[in-house]
Image: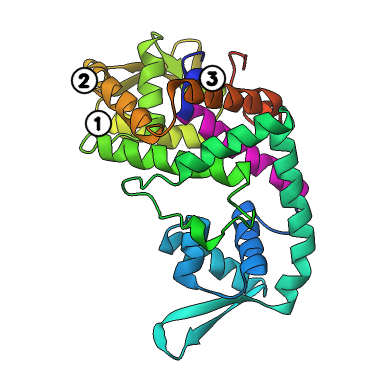
């Protein structure tokens, strides 16, 4: 796992899991994505739906899904605009305004816990680096209009949001760079792990990579159907199957290594080599401090 603990994509994905776990433990009120929308509407006032999507750095379909859930809870309302009936104005209801103080408290505590491993200057440095990454016009990534949130600190200073934004960029750049391979970053990671081991069971992959077994089953399905990995019944456990890398999988993996490096270079292009190394080290610190909170923390140590 030492390879992955040096990779920004893995670290950002783990931090995203940690954010969900911490906030879920703090808040019985809203999900993290719902909280961000509520905080934006509270600070910035009623917004056109597409402007809210830009302020939150979320695509239109995800925005609609989050708003549907918020509206079902009676916390927001959407009003069709007379001047443009194709768009709607989103605003907080009195019930939504009533939950905002608790959401603010929980969101602030999440940021405090994420920043706990650092001194104030170190925390400020991490936020500045992540802000620089987040404003990159990534290919295929939802636009983040930070200008909608000018210095308000709702999201533009939140480690939870900024790390997720960087993860969005990495995923988008990876999909563009590897177009045609039909592999996700997690599937690439699976092939890489299998290239270092003779075989592995689904449950062992779940423990090693820090994901729940059901998610691992989904990750494995595509490569197995395409003949990139093969499986056989485990001799020591008839209920389990051993997965191994095929020749086709090995060849594809070799061709993808330069593309993964290209992805990271594209996302981190505005950071110097020294700044990039510092950012990776700080992400490692967050992961080390909080991985125990996860239901499936990765094995192999975090240091």
Magenta includes 19? yes
Alpha carbon of mark 2 to alpha carbon of mark 3: how far? 23 Å
The earlier-in-sequence mark between 2 and 3 is 3
The earlier-in-sequence mark between 2 and 1 is 1
Side of 144 relative to 172 (left or right)? right
Between residue 175 and residue 53, name the one nearer to us: 53
Side of 48 relative to 153 (left or right)? left
Q: Which type of secondary structure does the marked residue at label 3 adopt?
A: helix
> In the image, which disc is placed on residue 248?
2
Between residue 268 and residue 228, name the one nearer to us: 268
Mark 3, residue position:
208
The quarter of the displayed image where residue 211 is located: top right
The quarter of the displayed image where residue 69 is located: bottom right
Q: Is residue 276 visible?
A: yes
Mark 1, residue position:
226
Between residue 161 and residue 127, name the one nearer to us: 127
Q: State the scheme by which the image is colored.
A: rainbow
Span highlighted in magenta in the image: 9-26
For the C terminus, give its image quadrant.
Answer: top right
Q: Which type of secondary structure does the marked residue at label 2 adopt?
A: helix
């Amino acid at each position: 796992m030492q390879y992955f603990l040096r990779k920004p994509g893995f670290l950002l994905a783990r931090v995203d899991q940690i954010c969900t776990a911490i906030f879920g433990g703090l808040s019985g009120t809203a999900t993290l994505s719902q909280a961000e929308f509520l905080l934006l509407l509270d600070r910035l006032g009623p917004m056109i739906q597409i402007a809210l999507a830009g302020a939150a750095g979320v695509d239109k379909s995800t925005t609609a899904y989050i708003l549907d859930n918020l509206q079902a809870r009676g916390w927001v309302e959407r009003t069709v605009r007379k001047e443009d009936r194709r768009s709607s104005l989103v605003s907080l209801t009195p019930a939504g305004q009533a939950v905002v103080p608790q959401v603010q408290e929980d969101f602030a505590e999440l940021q405090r816990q994420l920043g706990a491993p650092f001194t104030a200057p170190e925390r400020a440095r991490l936020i500045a680096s992540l802000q620089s990454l987040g404003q990159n016009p990534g290919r295929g990534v939802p636009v983040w209009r930070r200008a909608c949130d000018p210095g308000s600190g709702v999201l533009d200073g939140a480690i939870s949001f900024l790390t997720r934004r960087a993860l969005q960029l990495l995923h988008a750049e990876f999909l563009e760079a590897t177009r045609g391979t039909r592999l996700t970053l997690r599937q690439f990671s699976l092939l890489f792990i299998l290239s270092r081991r003779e075989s592995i069971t689904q449950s062992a992959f779940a423990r090693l990579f820090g994901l729940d077994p059901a998610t691992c089953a989904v990750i494995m399905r595509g490569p197995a159907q395409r003949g990139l990995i093969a499986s056989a019944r485990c001799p020591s456990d008839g209920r389990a199957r051993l997965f191994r890398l095929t020749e086709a999988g090995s060849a594809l993996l070799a061709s993808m290594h330069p593309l993964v490096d290209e992805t990271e270079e594209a996302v981190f292009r505005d950071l110097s080599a020294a700044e990039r190394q510092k950012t990776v080290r700080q992400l490692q610190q967050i992961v080390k401090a909080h991985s125990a909170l996860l239901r499936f923390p990765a094995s192999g140590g975090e240091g």
